[in-house]
Amino acid sequence: MKNTLTNLTRRPLMGVLAGALAVTLSAGCSSAPKTVDEAPVEVPEKSEQEKISESTGIPLEALGAFEEAMAAIEAGATERQTAIEALERAIEIEPTFAEAHYNLGLLYGEIDRNDDAVERIQNARELDPDVFDYTVALAKAYAENEQYDDAQTLFSEVVARDPNNLVAKNNMAVIALRRGEEDQALRYVEEILREDNVNVGALNTLGLIYMERENLSLAKYSLRKALKEDEANVDVLNNLGLVYIQEDNVPLAVDSFSKAIEADEDYLESRLNLAAILLEYLDYERANAHFTHAVRIAPHHCVANLGKGASSFAVGEHEDADERYSYYLEECDSDHLSSLERLAQLNETHLQRPEKAIAYYERLVELEDDVNKVANYQASINFMRSQLEQQAQQPEPEAAPEVEEAPEAEGEESAE
């Protein structure tokens, strides 16, 4: 379910840049007397980065890395890793660079590195506590990291500072829903809709509340009403697709997820949902294309890697399947039985790596409760070990004797 907290905007250095320009213009209006008998001294024009560096004390190298990150973010999700590396470099050069911490935190949140997102945005807020965006962002990061009490406290602070902030109120409704407090979530939403009866965020959350209550008719009504106000809202389209899935209306679900992808080709949730449907209905090539895009924009996303492993296996990309399943085990769930089983099969049958296959089967024997499966795993282990022992006992084939070339007869002439 996609009960997304309101997205946050990035903070470029425009505010700092405006200040630097103002200082420059003030200096240009000086009324100091000028001498007329001396040739004017040409002073090289400073770059905007140099002006910002002078006014903020941030080194030029850090500013350059920051601008590189902003350009990568502007290029789209496929350049997200480039942006992350540039911001990490900016912070390494200047640890007190609040905007870099903030933007890096947002990027970490996009790839589900929620602990890191909280840490970076906390750093930004500590460095510059007066920036309201940092408080809002930290509240959202807390919520995504399931630190709901901390998130609720900060969103309450936001509403106290800005009582008309309907976005913060809707985020409080989302948090209440995530905590299973449906009645409280409904009260927040109703309060918003009394002030703005076509508020898209509140209507989306209302649809989610009805989904939780399995009232699919009212869920569809709320989400469709939201789409009348914003027909390309990807969160609403995705959630409507989930309602159709609950109704077993696969064609309409596919249509809704597809519309979300048309509105934003890098919208991960709908890509994953559509890919899962295609995989289930054996459309392996199209499923693989969607999962490939998903891991390109979110290379550390657990579900994206697991899905890509399944689709790669289905289309015969066995090395890639091995890589994706291995990533899922190492980074997401080391005891995931189906991934262990698929890796064992891949290495036994397709990749011809019996030692690795045996290791996976041994892990399955430790974890699996089904005695019949355990017996099959043990049989595979015994068979492969027997083969390896036989191979070890076989003598290595002797090298074929080298054939010496006969020397040319003296006086032999080549044929013309």
Image (spheres, rainbow, N blue to C red):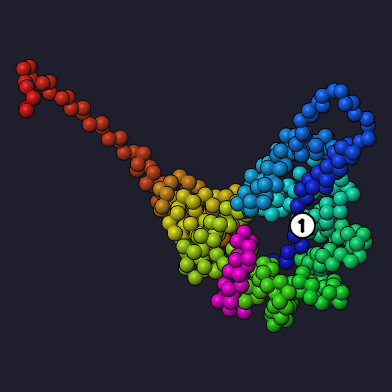
Q: What's the amino acid at mark 1?
A: Leu
Q: Residue at x 60, y 61 (%)?
A: 265
At horizontal 22% and vertical 31% (from top left) the residue drawn is 400
Q: Residues within 10 Å of mark 1 (few under 14, many from 20)?
A: few
Residue 263 belongs to magenta span = yes
Decide if residue 300 is on the left or right side of residue 108. Answer: left
Measured as percent of width and height from the top left, residue 169 is found at: 85, 66
- From this viewpoint, is residue 215 visible? no
Residue 106 seen by the camera: yes
Residue situated in front as seen by the camera: 273 or 327: 273
Q: Nearer the viewer, residue 279 or 36?
A: 36
In percent of width and height, residue 129 lies at 88, 48
Left or right of residue 160, residue 99 in this image: left
In the rendering, at what x and y percent does residue 187 appear?
85, 74
Q: Quadrant of the C terminus?
A: top left
Residue 9 sits in which quadrant?
A: bottom right
Q: Residue at the far top: name it.
A: 410
Give the quarter of the figure containing the N terminus: bottom right
Lateral position of residue 125 relative to residue 348, left or right: right
User: Which region shows up in magenta?
Assistant: 247-268
Rendered residue at 47%/57% (across/down): 313
Q: Total marks drawn?
A: 1
The residue drawn where x is 77% and y is 62% is 6
Q: Which residue corresponds to mark 1?
A: 8
